[in-house]
Amino acid sequence: MNHQKNKLLTLKVGPKAGDRFPLRYESNASIGHYFHNQYKKFFPVQDGKGADVKDWFEIKSKEFKFDKTHTSWTIGSMMEEDILRTNWKNTHIHEKIQIQVQILYTKNPNQVRSVSVYNFSENCTQALLEQDYKDIVNQLSTHSTVQGWEQLHGKYMHIERVEDTDQWKFRLTKKQMQMLKNAENFNNIFTN
């Protein structure tokens, strides 16, 4: 990723806070596809592994619920065996957590509540995420398998088992994102 792309702070195109979208999009998955399609008008958005707009940013969307303020953002999923044998920089999770465009929306009415750009690409932030990944791999390699749903925690991200499978979702809570932002700002005080 070149230096200019690392400086992405906002997008002048695509969904904006206050925009309404058709009521026919009811499920979270169909709404996510709708937002991807909106960005396809301006960028080469891909649907495979890795960042949605390769070498630029990942598009994430989530329903805003007034009674829940601390729901996590999913980064992506990996099979357990792939987590155990793949180093951080070779995972598609690493690519997905460089720069994220996060869209919060409501249903009934279907409306964009906010669009935020989170830049996790700074070296300090990536070092923290890489250490977390290593800690999660260590936990995963020594944990006893539990049927159903479970979590393993790092400081800055965590994983949740997709119930009764060998697949894990990498996730970030709002608090974890704030901790990463604070760590990045703290580091920038001491660098040239």
Image: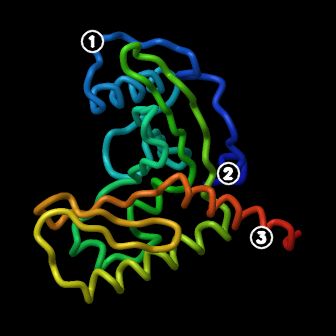
Task: Decide which of tag 2 and tag 1 comes sooner along the chain.
Answer: 2
Mark 1 neighbour class, 10 Å CA radius: few under 14, some 14 to 19, many 20 or more: few
Q: Mark 3 and mark 1: span between their CA atoms? A: 46 Å
- Residue 185 on image: x %, y %: 77, 62
Name the residue tied to disc 2.
6
Q: Residues within 10 Å of mark 2 (few under 14, many from 20)?
A: some
Residue 142 image offset from top left, x and y in percent:
26, 89
| Residue picked out by circle 3 | 187
Residue identifier under label 1: 24
Q: SS for tag 2? A: helix
Type of amino acid at the residue the image marks with label 1: Arg
Which quarter of the image is occupied by the N terminus?
Answer: bottom right
Image position of 100 with respect to 66: above or below = below
The residue lying furthest to the bottom in this view is 142
Q: Amino acid at mark 3?
A: Asn
Structural crowding at the residue carrying mark 3, measured as other residues with C-alpha within 10 Å and reported as few (<14), some (14–19) or many (≥20) = some
Q: Is residue 186 found left or right of 99 in the rendered image?
A: right
Residue drawn at x 16%, y 67% is 166
The label nearer to you, 3 versus 2, is: 3
Residue at the far right: name it.
192
